[in-house]
Image (cartoon, helix red, strand yellow):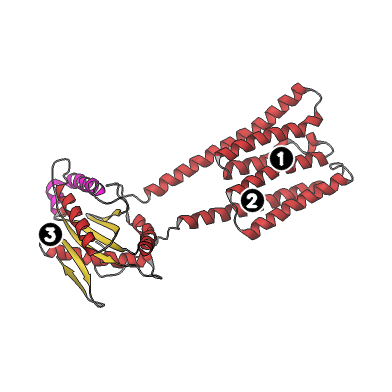
């Protein structure tokens, strides 16, 4: 049951809003790219102190300026603290261009500036870009390899083979990392989905209920509506389990869940909070609308049947509240559910298979009407 003593449960769950999660992802991308740029610039700067690698004159200054540009971009990313998909795409293409600049500044490109230097932008593209951007980068990679290797080959066949091998290797690595990333993302989504579902009924669980509280409260404030909480507890469910076995009880729970899923409105939140207790949250214009919905849910439970045609009824407790600015949605959610829980117990005492409504009077009193 849900804390009949009126205390809001501490679930230890604080799921980020979608906007917050996106912001965190952008910040991680910015830091990652900044670190990689710094590492690349420092490694590339070694050529400035090694004799015979760089061409003399302007080429050395251009090369040094390119390394400084990488460091400047890294500092900019670190200070900015976030990077979007378009910025990342531009940085990847800039990395391809910088490779061309490096090739023009190197005495022996085949020895000191092999196309494997493009592995850095290829892996960044595979991990951070979408599929269309990755396709563009793969074409650019082939073009850059061709431009970089052209002066070093007199034979068109040799040039074609080397470009094919180099660009093919780079693009194959990029595709492999991209597919790995997609696989990891799918697994994460599946894990997140399972963590929000009750395995027996397929309904949402407490965690999902908590995560939806900010959305429900925000929507109710925007639309000037109220939030209703309905606690449904199946009547004599323990007796059913004891008499017919837990397999029958599970079958009845599944039937009730399916019946409620087809009854609740699309925007409502239906969750199993434990045992034979379920919670429905939704926005309503007034108490009368909430009562009509609660009655529909009660009737839906009574009309559901398990695999062996066993039926149950439900006692329903109802409470409504108008969200106020500045309150914690999760704490307000559990206060509202606690009120509905008290009303549900009153429905049990009043004979079961009925709806009782929590009516707020001046604190700390609470009355129920059945």
Position of 85 with respect to 345 (left or right) is right
- Tell us which disc is closer to us: 1 or 3: 3
Using the numbered discs, state the Cα–Cα distance from disc 3 to disc 2 in whole angstroms: 62 Å
Position of 35 with respect to 8 (left or right) is right
Q: Residue furthest right?
A: 57
Badge 2 element: helix
Residue at the spot of label 1: 117
Residue at the spot of label 3: 352
Badge 1 element: helix
Residue at the spot of label 2: 33
Quadrant the C terminus occupies: bottom left
Position of 250 with respect to 174 (left or right) is left
Residues rendered magenta in the picture: 239-261
What x and y, as percent, mark residue 365? 22, 76
What x and y, as percent, mark residue 243? 11, 49
Residue 11 visible: no
Q: Quarter of the image holding residue 369? A: bottom left
Q: Count how many numbered circles sit on residues in the image.
A: 3
Badge 3 element: loop
Residue for point 64% across, 40% down: 122
Q: Is residue 143 above or below residue 160?
A: below
Residue for point 17% across, 40% down: 307
């Amino acid at each position: 049951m849900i804390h009949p003593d009126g205390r809001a449960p501490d679930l230890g769950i604080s799921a980020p809003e979608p906007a917050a999660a996106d912001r965190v992802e952008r910040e991680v991308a910015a830091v990652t790219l900044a670190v990689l740029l710094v590492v690349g610039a420092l490694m590339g700067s070694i050529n400035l102190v090694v004799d015979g690698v760089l061409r003399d004159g302007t080429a050395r200054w251009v090369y040094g300026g390119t390394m400084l540009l990488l460091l400047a971009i890294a500092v900019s990313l670190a200070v900015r603290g976030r990077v979007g998909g378009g910025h990342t795409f531009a940085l990847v293409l800039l990395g391809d261009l910088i490779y061309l600049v490096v090739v023009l500044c190197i005495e022996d490109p085949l020895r000191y500036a092999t196309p494997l230097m493009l592995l850095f932008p290829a892996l960044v593209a595979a991990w951070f870009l979408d599929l269309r951007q990755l396709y563009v980068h793969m074409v650019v990679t082939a073009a850059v390899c061709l431009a970089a290797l052209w002066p070093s080959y007199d034979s068109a066949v040799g040039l074609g083979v080397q470009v094919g091998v180099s660009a093919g290797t780079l693009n194959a690595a990029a595709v492999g990392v991209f597919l790995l990333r997609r696989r990891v993302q799918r697994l994460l989504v599946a894990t997140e989905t399972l963590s929000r579902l009750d395995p027996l009924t397929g309904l949402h669980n407490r965690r999902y209920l908590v995560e939806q509280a900010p959305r429900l409260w925000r929507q109710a404030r925007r639309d000037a509506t109220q939030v209703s909480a309905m606690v449904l507890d199946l009547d004599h469910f323990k007796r059913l389990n004891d008499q017919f076995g837990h397999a029958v009880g599970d079958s009845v729970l599944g039937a009730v869940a399916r019946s409620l899923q087809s009854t609740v409105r699309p925007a409502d939140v239906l969750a199993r909070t434990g045992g034979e207790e379920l919670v429905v949250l939704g926005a309503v214009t007034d108490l009368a609308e909430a009562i009509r919905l609660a009655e529909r849910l009660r009737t839906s439970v009574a009309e559901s049947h398990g695999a062996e045609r066993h039926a149950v009824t439900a006692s329903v407790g109802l409470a409504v509240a108008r969200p106020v600015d500045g309150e914690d949605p999760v704490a307000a959610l559990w206060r509202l559910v606690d009120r509905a829980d008290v009303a549900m117990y009153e429905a049990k005492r009043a004979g079961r298979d009925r709806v009782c409504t929590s009516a707020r009077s001046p604190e700390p009193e609470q009355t129920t009407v059945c």
